[in-house]
């Protein structure tokens, strides 16, 4: 008999993402170059806006050499907070290292995007990444780095320090990668344009490999309100999170524990909850047995008296900024926006913002035009699987005097500490009843406003034609009746024309 | 020989006066600073009645009002006033115009009609308001029929005014156009009018000297007779006191050609002086198909349907009509005027016509 032998092997997160790069959006050269730009731009936006800095982002994509068309150098420069020098290697060359594992809204969430871009560049070109960063004077640091994929560790190839005389702060990432820009170009430009819609307070400049310059200029100097970090809401909790909290807590009783570590739990609520869950108020959280932790989490999910999470941790655009962004990029004839009041699904707060734009640069297509955004990031792939798409297709637009084929576009922005993604690809939002209800009501609201605008416009147009009909025919009636009657003088109809105007106003 | 009184000039003066009054009324409303309006009898189906006394369709009492303050009325209102002005010019200058000409003429005055139907419609409005026919204000349809026989007329149109013509002078007949319609009747030796649906037979009648043999004025109807022809026949009947006999195909459509001359059409309910109530349908009847053994065709579905309609039509209530409709239904056959040729080309003139005229005169 021959023994069956099996080899067991542990792989690092870096190795895992190396093997499964398609799940992070790097499946092929077309998609990869799109994702690389997207990840770096989003990191730059995260490094500016939440710090109260108006973003200036410069993107340059150039061919690595004249010979090979398919290799590129991507350089993204921002005026953000910069990264403390010691953290640069970890931030960029270690997977699942992030400053954004907090309960507040940000674009990045996984500690994956930037690093994945660098990993992809490394495995396709075998070249290191260059990161230049400063958090402000006195110094600027320049790192040349690679990733030790098997160990998920950064390898520092070179480190230089310069004087920072210009009070510069920000980060420059320069990465080499394989890609297919000609094929990816339409999506990249669409992505940048839509990014400009939801970030009208940013200057974004893009120079493509053929030297073409695309500029998306800032039109508002106001930033969205900044998100405040928050505690987890009991409805959104799981067993693992509770364990982590138990490990670090200093609370001696469950009564304190509930108030200290959970969002919107005061003394009265904590007491009523513990009674509901069947735990004594003075039980020591650190002594809970595993099955008790599970029971506690179950009870948290089932207790209906927790106040809903509040939206301090969110950073919606606000109606003014959304409107400014739409006006800037779509130059519509009419725009309406609405921000729905905060709501929550499974303990995760969210806010839906909806806009509708009509006319101007909006193209007339056969189908409806939808722009989707999540946490100020445009979603340009997989539209038909998204909840917003389903909703706009289900609406009877005729009720609002609209129909597909008219030049109007719907914009849906969802912001949340936890976007209900359908897949890890972060392109489609799942159908959660709480969320879809808000989307639907938001769309209805702006559609009504557009409908009202169009009917008013129609009426004004009608009124104009109406008066022109009076102006055209009354003089004829006067002229020919005078001639018939053999009169020299044609009756003055000025007064009648003035009265014609009034008939409608009454 | 009869001497006939002059009527055309007076009629023209009256039409001009009516047009001027119409204009003056609007003018005065405008001078008072009010949106002018026009009231006229409604021509909608629910206001059309058959008048047994007049033996024609007439309009009821329902009126419609057109106001220049109503956006939907403005355009037709202006068109109507222009039409009145334009036809006044025509009548005054003794110029004529076809319906099509009128439609095109409007453009020169910056008045537009989307098609000729629209301008024809406005002409009908004007007829309704003035209570006279478009021929009275010198507007004629394109198609025209012809007349032949011993009648001397005197033209009243410019350049021909005072000139006389005997209607036997042209062997094809004389076209019943504007000049003839407005001519005065001077004298005639005829004692009847024979109106014929079809051109072939009209020519045959002239060749066979029917006008002499029967002392008749022959009128070629060209199918459903145009209004000017109906008006002309009426004048022959009223002014000259001549009885009128109408010959058509033996089918419901032929019957109706005769009926429209006699009792008018619903379309012309707003006009009185177009009918000739004493005219007679002289054939070809359904019963002639049997009595004269005429070659015939089977009735089509559409013929039968039409017969059913006619049976209920108040204009057809008299005995002759009802009888013939019933014969049609019974034998399910129809025939054309030309069917008599079966017995030789002159049979209809030699045999049928004298017999039928004799019967009807009794
Ligand atoms: N341009 C930048 N300026 C400042 N800090 C940056 C910049 N780019 C990356 N970082 C830091 O590096 C960390 C890792 O970035 P990375 O893109 O890998 O993950 P993330 O943005 O946190 O999450 P996600 O996977 O969703 O992008 C960030 O959390 C941030 O702290
Ligand atoms: Mg990121």
Image: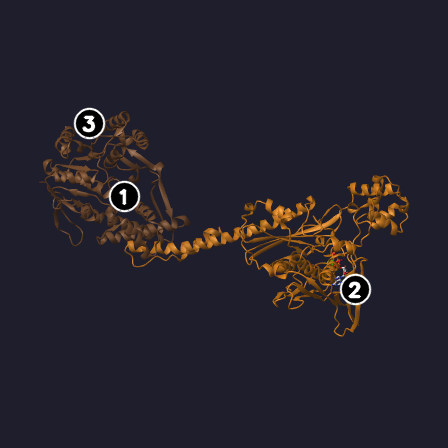
Chain colours: A orange, B brown
Label 2: chain letter: A
Report the Cα–Cα distance between label 2 and label 3: 118 Å
Q: Position of residue B165 (x, y in %)?
A: 12, 47
Q: Position of residue B157 (x, y in %)?
A: 18, 51
For residue B293, which numbered disc appears in the image? 3
Question: Residue beneath label 2, please?
Answer: A88
Q: Is B65 in front, or is B146?
A: B146
Question: Residue beneath label 1, please?
Answer: B131
Q: Position of residue A175 (x, y in %)?
A: 71, 64
Work out whether mark 3 precedes mark 1 in sequence or the reverse, and give the earlier one. 1
Q: Is there any visible trace of residue A101 in the rendered image?
A: no
Residue located farthest toward the top when viewing the structure as drawn: B330
Q: Position of residue B286 (x, y in %)?
A: 23, 28
Q: Residues within 10 Å of mark 3 (few under 14, many from 20)?
A: few
At numbered mark 2, what does the secondary structure look like: helix, strand or loop?
helix
Q: Count every numbered label the image shows and give the total.
A: 3
In front: label 2 or label 1: 2
Q: Is B61 in front, or is A143?
A: A143
Q: Is there any visible trace of residue A158 in the rendered image?
A: yes
| Badge 3 residue CB within 8 Å of ligand 1 | no
Q: Is residue A34 left or right of residue B298?
A: right
């Amino acid at each position: 008999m021959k023994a069956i032998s099996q080899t067991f092997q542990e792989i690092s997160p870096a190795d895992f993402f190396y093997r499964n790069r398609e799940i992070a959006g790097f499946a092929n050269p077309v998609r990869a170059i799109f994702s690389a730009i997207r990840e770096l731009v989003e990191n730059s936006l995260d490094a500016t806006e939440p710090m109260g800095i108006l973003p200036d982002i410069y993107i340059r994509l150039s061919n690595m050499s004249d010979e090979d068309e398919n290799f590129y150098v991507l350089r993204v420069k921002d005026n953000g907070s910069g990264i403390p020098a010691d953290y640069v290697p970890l931030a960029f060359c270690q997977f699942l290292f992030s400053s954004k594992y907090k309960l507040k809204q940000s674009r990045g969430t996984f500690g994956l995007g930037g690093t994945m871009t660098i990993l992809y560049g490394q495995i396709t070109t075998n070249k290191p990444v260059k990161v230049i960063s400063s958090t402000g004077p006195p110094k600027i640091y320049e790192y040349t780095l690679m990733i030790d994929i098997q160990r998920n560790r950064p390898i520092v190839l070179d480190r230089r320090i310069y004087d920072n005389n210009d009070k510069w702060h920000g980060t420059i990432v320069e990465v080499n990668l394989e890609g297919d820009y000609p094929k990816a170009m339409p999506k990249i430009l669409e992505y940048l344009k839509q990014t400009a819609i939801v970030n009208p307070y940013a200057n974004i400049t893009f120079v493509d490999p053929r030297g073409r310059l695309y500029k998306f200029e800032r039109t508002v100097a106001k930033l969205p309100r900044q998100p405040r970090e928050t505690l987890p809401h009991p409805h959104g909790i799981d067993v693992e999170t509770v364990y982590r909290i138990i490990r670090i807590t200093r609370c001696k009783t469950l009564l304190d524990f509930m108030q200290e570590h959970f969002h919107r739990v005061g003394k009265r609520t904590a007491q009523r909850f513990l009674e509901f869950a069947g735990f004594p108020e003075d039980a020591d959280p650190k002594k809970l047995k595993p099955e008790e932790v599970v029971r506690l989490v179950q009870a948290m999910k089932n207790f209906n008296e927790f106040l809903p999470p509040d939206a301090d941790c969110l950073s919606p655009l606000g109606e003014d900024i959304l409107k400014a962004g739409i006006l800037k990029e779509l130059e519509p004839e009419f725009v309406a926006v609405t921000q729905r009041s905060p709501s929550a699904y499974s303990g995760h707060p969210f806010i839906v913002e909806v806009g509708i734009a009509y006319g101007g640069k909006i193209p007339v297509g056969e189908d409806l035009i939808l722009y989707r955004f999540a946490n100020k990031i445009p979603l340009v792939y997989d539209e038909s699987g998204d909840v917003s798409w389903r909703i706009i297709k289900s609406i009877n637009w005729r009720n609002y005097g609209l129909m597909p084929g008219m030049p109007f576009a719907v914009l849906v922005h969802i912001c949340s500490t936890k976007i209900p993604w359908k897949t890890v690809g972060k392109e489609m939002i799942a159908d959660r009843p709480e969320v879809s209800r808000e989307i639907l009501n938001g769309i209805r609201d702006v559609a009504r406003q557009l409908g009202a605008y169009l009917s008013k416009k129609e009426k004004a147009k009608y009124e104009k034609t109406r008066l022109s009909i009076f102006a055209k025919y009354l003089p004829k009636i006067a002229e020919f009746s005078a001639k018939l009657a053999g009169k020299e003088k044609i009756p003055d109809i000025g007064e009648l024309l003035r009265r014609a105007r009034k008939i409608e106003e009454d | 020989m009869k001497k006939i009184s002059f009527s055309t000039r007076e009629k023209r003066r009256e039409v001009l006066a009516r047009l001027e009054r119409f204009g003056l009324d609007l003018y005065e409303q405008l001078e008072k600073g009010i949106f002018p309006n026009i009231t006229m009898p409604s021509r909608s189906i629910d206001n059309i009645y058959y008048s047994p006394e007049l033996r024609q369709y007439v309009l009821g009492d329902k009126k419609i009002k057109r106001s220049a303050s109503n956006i939907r009325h403005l355009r037709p209102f202006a068109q109507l006033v222009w039409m009145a002005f334009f036809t006044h010019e025509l009548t005054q200058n003794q110029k004529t115009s076809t319906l099509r000409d009128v439609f095109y003429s409007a453009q020169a005055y910056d008045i537009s009609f989307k098609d000729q139907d629209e301008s024809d419609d406005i002409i009908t409005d004007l007829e309704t308001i003035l209570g006279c026919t478009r021929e009275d204000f010198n507007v004629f349809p394109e198609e025209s029929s012809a007349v032949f026989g011993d009648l001397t007329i005197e033209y009243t149109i410019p350049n021909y005014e005072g000139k006389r013509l005997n209607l036997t002078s042209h062997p094809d007949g004389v076209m019943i156009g504007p000049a003839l319609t407005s001519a005065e009747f001077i004298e005639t030796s005829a004692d009847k009018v024979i109106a014929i649906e079809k051109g072939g037979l009209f020519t045959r009648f002239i060749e066979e000297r029917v006008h002499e043999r029967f002392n008749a004025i022959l009128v070629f109807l060209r199918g459903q007779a145009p209004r000017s022809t109906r008006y002309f026949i009426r004048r022959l009947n009223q002014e000259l006191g001549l009885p009128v006999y109408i010959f058509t195909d033996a089918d419901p459509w032929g019957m109706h050609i005769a009926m429209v001359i006699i009792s008018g059409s619903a379309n012309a309910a707003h006009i009185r002086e177009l009918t000739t109530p004493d005219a007679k349908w002289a054939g070809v009847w359904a019963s002639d198909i049997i009595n004269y053994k005429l070659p015939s065709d089977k009735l089509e579905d559409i013929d039968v349907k039409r017969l059913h309609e006619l049976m209920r039509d108040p204009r057809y209530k008299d005995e002759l009509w009802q009888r013939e409709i019933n014969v049609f239904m019974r034998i399910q056959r129809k025939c054309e005027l030309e069917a008599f040729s079966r017995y030789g080309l002159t049979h209809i003139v030699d045999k049928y016509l004298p017999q039928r005229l004799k019967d009807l005169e009794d």
